[in-house]
Amino acid sequence: MKPADSLERAIEQLHIKTKAETDRRILDDAFAAFLGSASRAPSGAGARQMPAIRRIAIPVGVAAAILVALILFFTIPSRKIASFGPVQTALAKAENICISTYRAGEAEPFQQIWSSKPLDLKLFKVGRGNQAQFTLWDVPNGAKKTKYVASGFVQTETILEPMPAELDKFEAESFGLVPFSDANGVPAEAQWSYLEDQKVAAAIPGAEVYDLTWAATAEETPSQTRIYRKWRLFADARSNRPKRVEWYSKRTPEDEYGFEIFSVVTYPGESDVENLVRNTFGPRSSDDPEYISTPGAER
Amino acid sequence: MPDDERLIAQLKRGDKEALREIYMKYKDHLLTIATSLLHDTSAAEDVLHDVFVSFAGSVRRLRIRGSLRNYLIASVVNRIRDQFRKKRHHLVELHEAGQVPADSNDPERSAEFNEESKRLTDALARLPYEQRETIILHLNGRMKFKEIAQTQGIPISTVQGRYRYGLDKLRTILKER
């Protein structure tokens, strides 16, 4: 459809944004309706009228299904993944995540990120020791808080949008853990391989190890020379969640890859993130000692 | 698998994050359509609320023919028509009102909803409802005349007529101002 004139174009371009509080209200109610629809199973009188044989057969069937699932879980070897796509999917499903990033050879991370979907917050820690700085994006409370560890000073700013677009993009692009945001960005000559070396895999129990190698243009160099990169992934053998990623590079194909940085990824519980925020900044809402839940949180 | 199909499949498997994704993807678009049709942002937000809550509660049983986007737009339009059926007098009041949509002074919205947009929605509110709906669905909802005809249960030629007469009238209204 091609608008014929400016009036048609103006109508086509009308755009009205929802307010953050409207989003919260609608999502809260929609999630409640969604969860409610899942729990609407036959009950009450219907259940009482169920024949005795079925009342016995159903629990036995459920128990058998659980047993079969457990046997399969422990006996079927995990399937190797053919690209980083399943890792991105697994990351997108993670409710709470913590990413600690280190420089090679260092024992303390130079950056840590916590992201919680149910709490609708992101917490960044940059720097170490006394020089560290925490930044909390607390969407339900409409606040961005910054804490300077050296002084203990906490600066609070109001945020009006649900989450800054660049942070949403950062999350959508797998928190920078994966080198390409989608398969289209992967150079044609890139190579994906499963690492058979059990010594490497043994470093992270329960993980399968994969390497992705490719050549990129080193844009930071005046000569625009090529740089050879390797991304090593330690993915949980069953869930495909990344447990650790490592980044390497070299200047010529003949060189050995140099280990640069690595990230350790963990999946804390909601209460762990909640406690960390409380311990760093105090209760999230000064008016309410109770922790404020977020749109979509199961209550 | 197209994105919406994937989201629906995830939803049917009980993944509530897919519901959030669908909401975030379509909320502004649906609110714009509802506000343009109702000329009342608060009432439009209520429609958006009802449509999403109803969608969330029934999605496991739903079989959506066509696109999810058109399904949600049709849900918004049907709910608004239901409201009009219940309060028939609103149809008359709306074209005579020429009032400012509620919340138009909201600073959060002012950047998007500028003076020109307000002038346009005021003018749209003076059109007969059927013409307004056709214009909004075709231009803002990006629905084809054939799709609008299907949702309204009328011939395509009638939809095209409503569109043409509506636009002519809209131009006249805007010239008067």
Image (cartoon, rainbow, N blue to C red):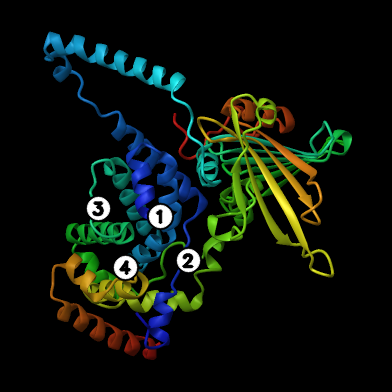
**Closest to the observer: B17 or A192?**
A192
* Residue B91: x %, y % from top left: 23, 69
Mark 4: few/some/many CA within 10 Å (<14, 14-19, 20+): many
Residue name at image x 28 percent, y 86 percent? B169
Distance between the alpha carbons at the discs numbered 3 and 1: 14 Å
Q: Amino acid at mark 4?
A: Leu
Determine whether the residue tagged by mark 4 lies in a helix, strand or loop. Answer: helix
Distance between the alpha carbons at the discs numbered 1 and 2: 33 Å
Determine whether the residue tagged by mark 2 lies in a helix, strand or loop. Answer: loop
Quickly name the residue at label 4.
Answer: B37
Q: Quadrant of residue B150?
A: bottom left
Question: Residues at marks 4 and 3, common chain?
Answer: yes
Q: Chain of mark 2?
A: B
Q: Which numbered circle lies on residue B64?
A: 3
**Closest to the observer: A9 or A151?**
A9
* Residue A268: x %, y % from top left: 61, 28
Residue name at image x 88 percent, y 34 percent? A130
Q: Amino acid at mark 3?
A: Ile
Q: Chain of mark 4?
A: B
